[in-house]
Amino acid sequence: MTTFEEIVPALDRLAIEVPSWAYGNSGTRFKVFASAGTPRTVREKIADAAQVHALTGLAPTVALHIPWDRVDDYAALGAFAREHGVALGTINSNTFQDDVYRLGSLTHHDPAVRRTAIDHHLECLEIMAHTGSRDLKIWLADGTNYPGQGDLRARQDRLHDSLAEIYAHLGEGQRLVLEYKLFEPAFYHTDVPDWGTAYAHVSALGERAYVCLDTGHHAPGTNIEFIVTQLLRLGKLGSFDLNSRFYADDDLIVGAADPFQLFRILAEVVRGGGLDAGSPVALMLDQCHNVEDKIPGQLRSVLNVQETVAKVLLLDRDALAAAQAAGDVLAANAVVMDAFWTDVRPALADYRVSRGLPADPVAAYAASGYQARIAADRVGGTQASWGA
């Protein structure tokens, strides 16, 4: 039986990257909602993200989105982040908002549009050279809405060629991570709709190309932990975008809709060595806080991941293996459920205190006065939101 003290080294390694855009305004298809204290610049986003790391010790890096977070001096931005106790992380490209990408970007039938999209990714690689970022993450809105709108086979060929050119420009220590999504905004077909398509493309590129798994990008009922298992055993799981969904790509606080699903996913991550020292698997949040405050939303998310990881690490693997070998279905399931129902919150509170962190980071943030200060200070200017 594993004790909490035995899992502490693994907990100490846990790092969850937070996204800059989670601190901006967001909303539904119909309305982006404003909120007091919302950042107006990428530096204010980083300052807010730094609060999450300062209170939890779990979020040492901040992902950027280009062009939303474009600045003139990325070295200075990196220095600003370090002054606030964090570092710049994954660089996310954007080929889904400019008018030129209406019919696609890296898969577009017009070579000039593909050139524009490729050059944008090469710009992202240049930015990574200044920020020290390892991963270029690519999510494409490319696809079609009607049968016959595009040549499905030709679009895949063009996608391969475009990705191959980007991959060829990777610098030392840099990786390309390709994200997939079942649907939206393309509804007849999406050019990278599933893990198999993403895996096929990154496998053709080379050993520094990986798949990103967004937990909200699957059809209802999909066994996501099985996909995690496959990508880990194939050596091609590069990163997670952790969030929660009820219906589609809802981008809710991770673990909010189905905590047991998060447990099952992370159990396979641990089983496959995804949380071992030196693992290529990066954990990141990808969420939009529409009705809740941004910083508390990110705090709750990283804490949900930490609590779930602790439960997974306490899973009695020997008892589970014995039950499986004996063909004892109920005993095996009971071992899993015992770990899932374990209340790790008191032990984690003590763990945080032992590391100079507040026992309850959410309560500590509420008592800090930070939210009131930024609401008073951040008056005027344009609040960051989708597309900014």
Image: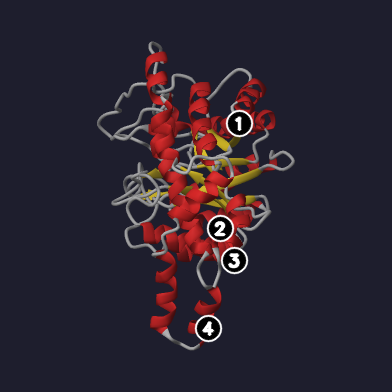
Task: Look at the image and tell me in which quarter the N terminus lies.
Answer: bottom right
Q: Position of residue 32 (x, y in %)?
A: 30, 28
Query: Disc 1 or 3, which lies upstream in sequence?
Result: 1
**Alpha carbon of mark 4 to alpha carbon of mark 2: how far?**
36 Å
On the picture, is 244 further left or further right than 200? left
Q: Position of residue 147 (x, y in %)?
A: 33, 50
| Pointer 4 with pointer 2, Cβ within 8 A | no
> In this figure, which residue is indicated by the disc labeled 1?
85
> In this figure, which residue is indicated by the disc labeled 2?
200
| Pointer 2 with pointer 1, Cβ within 8 A | no
Query: Disc 3 or 2, which lies upstream in sequence?
Result: 2
Query: Disc 4 or 2, which lies upstream in sequence?
Result: 2
Query: Disc 2 or 1, which lies upstream in sequence?
Result: 1
> Identity of the amino acid at label 3?
Arg
Q: Which disc is residue 233 wearing? A: 3
User: Toward the viewer: 59 or 68?
Assistant: 59
**Alpha carbon of mark 3 to alpha carbon of mark 2: how far?**
15 Å
Query: Disc 3 or 4, which lies upstream in sequence?
Result: 3
User: Toward the viewer: 337 or 204?
Assistant: 337
Q: Which disc is residue 322 wearing? A: 4
**Alpha carbon of mark 4 to alpha carbon of mark 1: how far?**
45 Å
